[in-house]
Image (cartoon, helix red, strand yellow):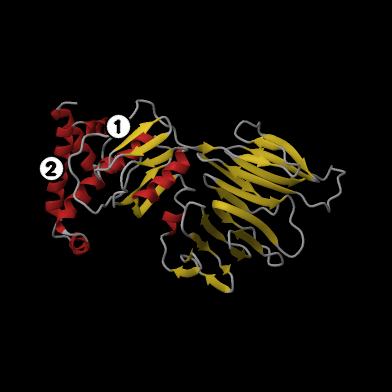
């Protein structure tokens, strides 16, 4: 791209009237060092004109002056990725590093993939199964719906006795997600590398399921049968509400975040009652409540986004690893970086990894491995 075309596209972007195709062209220009420098000059000019605004003045007290330029530059650069990174921070001023080397192939994002394990142990890959009834469990029909959804429906024509308890498991692999409508009408969205075990019909005094990984729940109200999610050494009890649970084995904490209604979170002898916007945060044996949590950030994965907020490099890479089904290898000590922002999960892996380039983090892609070299 020549300088004139670049300047025109940059001006259109800054004015907010750029087309998606032009965004892609502008994104490609980041591979040119001269263009990257022109980006910085443009954003520095914007920063200078806004330096007297109250918002920026307040930020300046939070971020040292030598970081303000990098913060603003990356904010605009990364806004080009998919529908946009919103902001980006790091602990050190970036150098003008060469573009990270990578193989030419592109790793695709995850999609609607899951394996259903029936009560007899047989398994059904749902991404390849046809829509419609795919199995019977007792007097319940298992139905695959459109758009990555599974449902359970009572089969009134079945002669099978209804008092036999059957358990099914829905497991999403790395690079997969799926939604299930449970027998009581509750809806559960499963993130990548997640497993949910549940009965094919609820009976008794409670509705109990077991979770590993991350899921978002919208529970059908039933005051006589509380809904209980058992996860690791935590139990979440609700009547009817919307909440998110994150409990991956490779994360050092378990988070239960409430969006609507109320839940009770139990760990050993400690019980906490959450209100909307609060999160029960369990690390080791210590459970605390975080208030005024950004719930949009918590459920961004369900809505098709990565959303990072002062996230460490390993934290970013764990999410990328699960969604793109890739392995992450660190050849050197893990650099101290903080990342923030938002990007669509249907972006290619190469687009997402451009975040790293702007923090002077070098990487290589080999097969399905991301090798961090700095």
Residue nearest the viewer, comparing 50 with 295:
295
2 relative position to 252: left or right: left
Where residue 70 appears, as percent x and y from the top left, is 19, 49
The residue that mark 2 highlights is 41
Mark 1 or mark 2: which comes first in sequence?
1
In the drawing, does residue 82 fall left or right of residue 89?
A: right
Question: Where the C terminus falls, by quadrant?
Answer: top left
Most foreground residue, 224 or 166: 166
Vertical arrangement, residue 239 with respect to residue 167, above or below: below
Q: Which mark is residue 24?
A: 1
Neighbourhood count class around disc 1 (C-alpha, 10 Å): few under 14, some 14–19, many 20 upward: few
Q: Are marks 1 and 2 in contact (CB under 8 Å)?
A: no
Q: Residue at x 42, y 29 (%)?
A: 367
**Relative to 140, residue 60 above or below:** below
Q: Residue 10: which quarter of the image?
A: top left
- Nearer to us in this view, 320 or 147: 320
Callout 1: SS: helix
* Residue 262: percent from left, percent from top: 56, 67
Q: How many marks?
A: 2
10 Å neighbourhood of mark 2: few (<14), some, or many (≥20)? some
Q: CA distance from mark 1 to mark 2?
A: 21 Å
């Amino acid at each position: 791209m020549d300088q004139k075309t670049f300047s025109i596209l940059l001006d259109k972007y800054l004015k907010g009237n750029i087309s998606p195709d032009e965004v892609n062209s502008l994104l490609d220009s980041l591979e040119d060092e001269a263009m990257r420098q022109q980006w910085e000059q443009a954003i520095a000019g914007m920063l200078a004109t806004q330096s007297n605004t109250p918002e920026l003045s307040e930020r300046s007290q939070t971020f040292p002056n030598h970081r303000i330029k990098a913060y603003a530059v990356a904010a605009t650069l990364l806004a080009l990725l998919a529908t946009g990174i919103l902001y980006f921070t790091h602990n050190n001023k970036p150098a003008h590093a060469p573009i990270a080397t990578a193989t030419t192939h592109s790793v695709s994002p995850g999609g609607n993939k899951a394996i259903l394990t029936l009560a007899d142990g047989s398994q059904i890959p749902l991404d390849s199964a046809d829509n419609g009834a795919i199995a019977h469990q007792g007097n319940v029909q298992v139905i695959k719906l459109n758009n990555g959804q599974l449902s359970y429906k009572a089969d009134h024509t079945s002669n099978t006795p209804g008092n036999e308890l059957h358990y099914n498991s829905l497991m999403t692999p790395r690079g997969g997600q799926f939604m299930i409508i449970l027998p009581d009408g509750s809806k559960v969205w499963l993130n990548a590398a997640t497993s949910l075990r549940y009965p094919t019909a609820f009976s008794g005094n409670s509705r109990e399921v077991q979770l590993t990984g991350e899921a978002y729940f919208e529970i059908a109200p039933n005051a006589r049968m509380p809904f209980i999610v058992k996860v690791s050494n935590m139990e979440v009890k609700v009547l009817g509400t919307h909440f998110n649970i994150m409990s991956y084995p490779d994360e050092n904490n378990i988070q239960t975040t409430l969006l609507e209604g109320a839940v009770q979170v139990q760990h050993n002898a400690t019980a906490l009652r959450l209100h909307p916007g609060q999160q029960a945060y369990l690390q080791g044996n210590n459970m605390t409540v975080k208030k005024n949590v950004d719930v949009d950030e918590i459920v961004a994965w369900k809505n098709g986004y990565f959303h990072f907020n002062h996230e460490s490099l390993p934290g970013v890479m764990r999410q990328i690893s699960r969604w793109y089904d890739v392995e992450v290898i660190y050849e050197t000590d893990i650099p101290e970086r903080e990342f923030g922002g938002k990007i669509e999960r249907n972006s290619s892996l190469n687009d997402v990894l451009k975040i790293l380039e702007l923090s002077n983090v070098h990487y290589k892609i080999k097969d399905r491995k991301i090798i961090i070299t700095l």
